[in-house]
Every structure is written in structure tokens, then in C-alpha cells.
Image: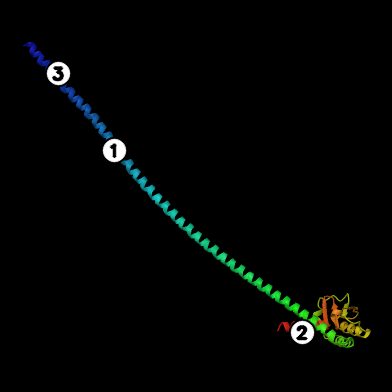
Amino acid sequence: RRMEYDLRVIIFIQIIIFLGLVLLLRRIIFSASARELTRLRELSADNERKAKLLAKELERAEKEHLHKVDKAEAELRDVKANLREEAQKQKEDALRKAREEGDKIVTQALGVKDRIRTDLEGQLTERSIEMACGMMRDVLTDDKMRWFHVGLVDDIADALGGIDRARLEGVDVSKGATVQTPYPLSDAQLSALRDRLSQVVGPGLQLDQAADQSVIAGVSIRLGNLIIDGSLAGKLRRVGASAAHR
């Protein structure tokens, strides 16, 4: 019985030790589980915080992206508007230049037309004058042509006294004057012309004469850059020019 009692005591002690170990192990396991749970909770809270931060960052990034997209679209609209405006401006400039070039061409064409018409009129007038001069030479005898010539010389001599002095402004009279005539002038005729011119330009005027059959009759006086035309050819040209402008 003593041994049985000791055995029971040993068994009881072992049970108590076992229960103590179970409680200790349970406590250790519970403590570890609590720490792990706390760690998991902290980790979950940290993940949730990071998730919130990530969501905010995503929202900010999305807003920034939308802002950039809106800005890019606005810039694209501005570029398109500027391109349209520039294209319209270039079109208007091209049309304006085309109109100006067209007007210039038309103006040049009209100018060429006017010059051609003027040249033709001048050529016709000159031919008409040549024909008239030839007819007068054929119709009038030399004596009658000389008589006509003397009358024209007297007419120009009378007209020299009433010449407009404004025509003589800037005229160099220092080199004298030249009388172009188809017939030699007499001393009296040459003196009359010199006296009348001297009344206008001043005394001491040198007057020379030169033969010119194109004058036909009368005289043409060259005084510096001024020409006083009292010739028959000059009268015919003036009549032709007056008729052409009517």
C-alpha cells in the first residue's frame, strides 16, 4: 500500500506539472498570438494608411492628368485657331497680291496700249506732216515758197517781242542763239530777229544761222535749251497734235 500511495502521489504531481506546463504553454501561445495579432493589426492599419495615401496619390495623379489633358486640348485648340487664322491671313494676302499683280498687269497693259496709241498717232502725224510738206513743195514753186518763207520770218520776228519772259528762266544765253532756216536770211531779217530777241534777253546777243531743209519755211530758233519754233513744219506739227487730242 505504501508503494501504491507513492505512485499515486507521483502521478498526481505529474498531472499537476502537466497542467502547469499546459497552462504555461497556453500562456506562451496566447502571448505570442496576441503579439502576432497586434502586429497584424498594426500591419493592417499601416496597409490601410498606405492604401489611403495611395488612393489620394492616385486621385491627385488623375486630377493632374486630367488637368494636363485639358491644357493640351486647349493648346491644341489654340494651335488650330492660330493655324486657321494664319491660313486665312495667307489666303487674304495671296488674294490681295494677286489683285495687286492683276491691277499692275492691267495698268501696264493700258500704259503699253496708250504708248502704242501715242506712238502710232505720232507716227501718223509725222507721216501726215511729211506728206503735207511734200505736197506743198510739189504744189508751190520755189518763188512762192520763198515768199511764204519771208512771211513766216516776219511773223516770228513780230512775235518775239511778246514772248513770255517766264519761258526764259534758267535759259543760258551766254552762247548765243542759232536760227535754223531752209533759205539764207538777209542781213535785215537776221538783224530784226536779233533786235527782238535782245529786247527780251538783253543786249549783245550773238545770233547765228544754220541751213535746215526740214524746216520747209520760216525759222526755228534754239536759245540754250529753249526752242522757239516759227517754221512751217512746226506749225503743221502743232495742228496735227491739236487734231489728235480732239
Name the amino acid, label 2. Answer: Val
Q: Is residue 200 visible?
A: no
* Residue found at x 28% / y 34%: 39
Q: Is residue 29 visible?
A: yes
Q: Is residue 12 left or right of residue 32?
A: left
Spatial separation of the CA atoms under disc 1 and disc 3: 43 Å
Looking at the rendered structure, the number of numbered marks drawn on it comes to: 3
* Residue found at x 21% / y 29%: 30
Q: Which residue lies most toward the front here? A: 138
Name the amino acid, label 1. Answer: Ser
Q: Mark 1 or mark 2, which has the lower sequence index?
A: 1
Residue placed under numbered mark 3 in the picture: 14
Q: Is residue 66 left or right of residue 89?
A: left
Report the quarter where the C terminus lies: bottom right
| Quadrant in which residue 184 is drawn | bottom right
| Colouring style | rainbow
Q: 191 or 66, which lies in front?
A: 191
Q: Which residue lies most toward the top here? A: 2
Mark 3 falls on what kind of element? Answer: helix
Q: 14 or 111, which lies in front?
A: 111
Mark 1 falls on what kind of element? Answer: helix
Q: Where does residue 113 sit, x and y in percent of width and height?
A: 68, 74
Q: 86 or 243, which lies in front?
A: 243
Name the amino acid, label 3. Answer: Gln
Q: Where does residue 172 sit, x and y in percent of width and height?
A: 85, 75
Q: Can you tell which of label 2 and label 3 is closer to the viewer?
A: 2
Residue placed under numbered mark 2 in the picture: 239
Determine which of the numbered discs, if any, sits on residue 22 in the image. none
Q: Mark 1 or mark 3, which has the lower sequence index?
A: 3
Determine which of the numbered discs, if any, sits on residue 44 in the image. 1
Spatial separation of the CA atoms under disc 1 and disc 2: 121 Å
Residue contact between numbered discs 2 and 3, judged by CB atoms under 8 Å: no
